[in-house]
């Protein structure tokens, strides 16, 4: 203990910091914009909700409806669309609720848990949404194949199915990479510290 | 924030700002990162002050908010070894001749703390500030037993680094 005791004395006697600021400066600093990871998680999360849902605006809805009708999918698209919106609002509410819970006054452990929970809400929504898109692609492709099955032979059917699967895997892979990169950079430090603190629990 | 609340915050913070500076010095290694983290701590304290009920001392509350900011909210993580100040390297040379003044010891102590991980930094900091285990465990959100175990390990790590 002796070694640290010596250093501790030096710690206790350390002079005031050279960067000391006046209360006027404190006031100015307090007005500046936060750049905490929570802010970034909120901004990116909202951007994800918006971007995933604005994909639909890129599609010519009249044209799409006609196609769905031809394929006999109008009911499927209508009800699954409503369900998707209900689920979107559930996730949005959950996201906001978790975000609100993040507070610098919590204990370190709770704070980290809340940050991670907020991020996971968005992640789960993305998984749901991608799953929904994949489902729609599969259903539409199957309906198309069924309709065209008279004119296509087995080989052509297999090739079509294969190409569609490749496209799905490619899109998912690209998205996954982007996601890993974005949150990987943002949360690397937090994850490391969270793991370090979690290690304590496994001690008991 | 109301005017008198603002005034109270500013005077409380001004008096206790050394806590924040010490934390900045532990978690960052250059001047611009120091003021960056100090800014974020200030913002978090300011934002949360209306919720501060005063059932604990301002300083106790400040330790928690400032450490949380450094550990979880502040985004940049500094890889310390490569970005240390030239001043610190100079001290490293000085520290080898055994005439250890407190100033030299303090520099060596900060340098050693920089090598610890973020959680160990917090534990060592709270130890150096004479915080009781109860407060340490409440700040970090871990049990007192865990805090004790982890503290002993952190101290051992620090001693190993400081060993001449």
Image: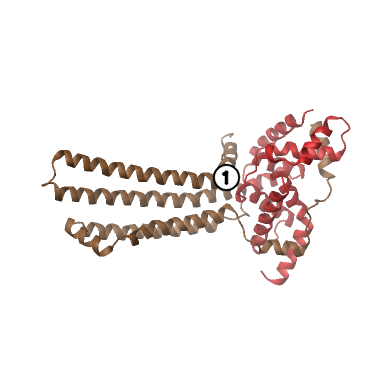
Chain colours: A brown, B red
Q: Nearer the viewer, residue B92 or A14?
A: B92
Number of marks in picture? 1
Where, by quadrant of the figure, is residue A200 drawn? top right
Q: Secondary structure at mark 1?
A: helix
Q: Is residue A98 visible?
A: no
For residue A110, above or below residue A27:
above
Which one is in front, A34 or B12? A34
> Could you tell me which residue is drawn at 57 percent across and 48 percent down?
A112
> Which of these two is toward me, B90 or B154?
B90
Residue A62 image position (x, y, % from top left): 25, 65
Query: Taking B152 as reference, is A5 left or right?
Result: right
Image quadrant holding the N terminus of chain B, namely: bottom right
Task: Spot the residue most to the top.
Answer: B164
Residue A99 visible somewhere in the drawing: yes
Mark 1 — on which chain does it sit?
Answer: A
Q: Using the rendered view, name the quadrant where residue B8 is placed.
A: bottom right
Residue A118, percent across and down? 50, 52
* Residue at the bottom extreme, as displayed: B3
Q: Which residue is mark 1?
A: A190
Which residue corresponds to the image point at 83% horizontal and 30% vertical from the top-left?
B96
Looking at the picture, how far across and down is residue A111, in whole percent? 58, 50
User: Residue at point 21% right, 56% down?
Assistant: A73
Residue neighbourhood size for the residue with mark 1, other residues' Cα within 10 Å, grouped as few (<14), some (14–19), many (≥20): many
Question: Residue B157 is drawn in which quadrant?
Answer: top right
Q: Quadrant of the C terminus of chain B?
A: top right
Figure check: A193 above or below A119: above
């Amino acid at each position: 203990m002796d070694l640290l005791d010596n250093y501790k004395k030096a710690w206790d006697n350390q002079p005031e910091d050279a960067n000391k600021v006046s209360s006027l400066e404190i006031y100015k600093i307090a007005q500046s914009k936060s750049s905490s990871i929570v802010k970034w998680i909120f901004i990116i999360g909202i951007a994800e909700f918006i971007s995933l849902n604005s994909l639909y605006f890129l599609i010519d809805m009249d044209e799409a409806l006609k196609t769905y009708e031809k394929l006999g999918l109008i009911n499927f698209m209508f009800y699954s669309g409503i369900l998707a919106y209900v689920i979107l609002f559930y996730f949005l509410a959950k996201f906001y609720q978790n975000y609100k819970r993040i507070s610098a006054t919590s204990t370190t452990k709770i704070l980290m848990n809340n940050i991670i929970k907020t991020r996971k809400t968005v992640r789960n929504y993305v998984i749901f949404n991608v799953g929904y898109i994949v489902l729609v692609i599969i259903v539409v492709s199957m309906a198309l194949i069924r309709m065209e099955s008279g004119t296509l032979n087995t080989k052509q059917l297999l090739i079509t199915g294969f190409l569609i699967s490749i496209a799905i895997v490619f899109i998912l892979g690209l998205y996954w990479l982007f996601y890993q990169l974005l949150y990987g950079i943002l949360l690397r430090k937090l994850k490391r510290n969270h793991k370090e603190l979690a290690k304590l629990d496994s001690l008991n | 924030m109301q005017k008198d609340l603002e005034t109270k915050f500013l005077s409380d913070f001004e008096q206790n700002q050394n806590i924040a500076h010490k934390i900045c010095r532990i978690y960052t290694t250059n001047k611009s990162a120091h003021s960056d983290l100090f800014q974020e701590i200030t913002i978090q304290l300011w934002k949360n002050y209306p919720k501060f009920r005063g059932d604990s001392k301002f300083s106790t509350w400040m330790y928690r908010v400032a450490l949380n900011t450094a550990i979880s909210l502040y985004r940049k993580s500094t890889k310390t070894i490569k970005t240390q100040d030239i001043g610190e390297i100079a001290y490293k040379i000085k520290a080898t001749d055994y005439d250890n003044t407190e100033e030299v010891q303090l520099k060596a102590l900060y340098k050693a703390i920089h090598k610890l991980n973020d959680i160990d930094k917090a534990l060592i900091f709270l130890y150096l500030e004479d915080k009781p285990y109860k407060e340490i465990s409440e700040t970090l959100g871990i049990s007192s037993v865990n805090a004790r175990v982890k503290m002993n390990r952190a101290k051992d790590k620090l001693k190993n680094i400081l060993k001449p």
